[in-house]
Image (cartoon, rainbow, N blue to C red):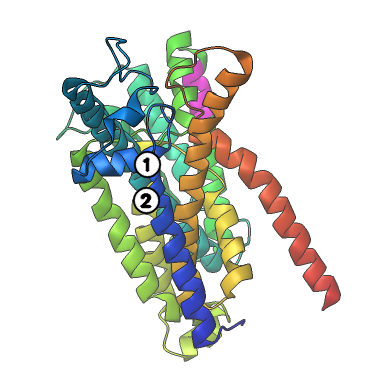
Amino acid sequence: MTSLSRGQFIFRLTACVVFLAVLLLLSPGIGTESASFGWSDAWRAQLGLPIDAASLVARPFVDTDGDGQVSEEELAGFVALAKHIGFGLRFPRTLLALQVGITLAMCGATFQILFRNPLATPYTLGVVNGGSLGALLAIRFGWTVMVCGISSIALAAFGGAVSIVVAVFVFVRGSRRLTSNELLLAGVTMGMFCSAMMMFITSVSDERVTFATIRWMMGSLDPISDLEQMTLLPMMVPAWIGLMLMSRAMNQYRLGDELAQTRGVNVVALQGISVALCTLATAGVVGYCGPIGFVGLVVPHIAVLLVGNDCRILLPASGLLGGGFLVVCDWGAQLTMRLAGWVTGRDVGSATLPIGVVTAIVGVPLFLVLLRTKLGQRQRS
């Protein structure tokens, strides 16, 4: 088990925290409307700091009367717009990306440990398939009921994601302890069943339903309401805390079930609690944001290379790296369309790439590089 000295751990943890702080500082100025104002303007507007009106003359949508001067009324409009876009749209989107990235990366690292499989992800037990089936049913039958401000699609996706994992445990649970292979096989099987049901429902649906389903399955980080964020956090935060509290037991679990039991680890409880926490957190993410791939697969491998295999360090490091990774990918999703519009000479407005597309584009080559790096390390050893 690779270990870090106290100084190395503090330095790397501090570097991750500083990196995330810089991302949050810059986030109000990065988006599809970046030409209008930057992060400095957004922070000045939010904090009530003075803004030089003369420097705004050349900005788009500021000098509305075209007289070459920015009046007090135009300046007030610029400040209100900067505050709304910077902290009403961009900053909440970055916070959501940070929370989702932390959750997926920590859950991915946990599943790779529990299943002793480097290809395990938070979606291994069929969470995405169940959530997608639930969302498809809501779209297909036109469910528009709002429960406490939460859309029926989000509720159906969350219910489908949780139900599929419960079904996995119901089918494979017995008096004996579960094995990793049994859980993996049951999860894959139930996922294939959900995929088959989705294909059947799609085949008897119209183009609108098919397009809406495909668009949902690409994932989205559009800002959600305050109520939805309040609903999402109680599923995420307990998972973060619970997984870190169980990190010592996970270190023993990695050495084998029998050895872990001799050292006082309740393997069944560890499996059950970990899967329950990860399922609820991941189901919440899928319900609100759709499936966002590669974060839970790639980021834990990067964390292992940086901090080693000690779960007490690996899990929080995976979370911090996952949050930063998804924030940067989300910026890429927004800026890529702006760049494409500049290259083609077309006005794309506020269009953004689906975040799932960007994480796949970034994650695939990154994972191949990591695989090559690990193979090289094994050959040298």
Can you tell which quarter of the image residue 309 is in?
Answer: bottom right
Residue behind mark 1: 39
Crowding near pointer 2: few (<14 within 10 Å), some, many (20+)? some
Secondary element at tag 1: helix
Q: Given the image, on which type of amino acid does mark 1 rest?
A: Trp
User: Where the C terminus falls, by quadrant?
Assistant: bottom right
Is residue 359 found left or right of 168 in the rendered image? right
- In this view, the residue in front, 373 or 160, is 373
Give the percent coordinates (x, y) of residue 200.
51, 21
Give the percent coordinates (x, y) of residue 41.
32, 38
* Residues drawn in magenta: 196-202
Q: Residue at x 46, y 59 (%)?
A: 19
Residue behind mark 2: 25
- In this view, the residue in front, 363 or 39, is 39
Q: Which residue is drawn at 53% across and 50% down?
A: 295
Q: Given the image, on which type of amino acid does mark 2 rest?
A: Leu
Q: Are marks 1 and 2 in contact (CB under 8 Å)?
A: yes
Q: Is residue 377 visible?
A: yes
Is residue 352 found left or right of 234 in the rendered image? right
- In this view, the residue in front, 65 or 167, is 65
Determine the main secondary structure of the stretch shown in magenta. helix
Magenta stretch containing residue 123, yes or no?
Answer: no
Q: Can residue 166 be seen in this view?
A: no
When the figure is inspected, residue 304 is found, relative to residue 350, above or below; the finding is below
Q: In whole angstroms, how far apart are the C-alphas of marks 1 and 2?
A: 8 Å
Give the percent coordinates (x, y) of residue 318.
49, 63
- In this view, the residue in front, 23 or 245, is 23
Crowding near pointer 1: few (<14 within 10 Å), some, many (20+)? some
Q: Which residue lies furthest to the right in this view?
A: 379
Q: Residue at x 34, y 27 (%)?
A: 56
- Considering only order in the chain, which callout, 2 or 1, is on the residue closer to the N terminus? 2
Magenta stretch containing residue 199, yes or no?
Answer: yes
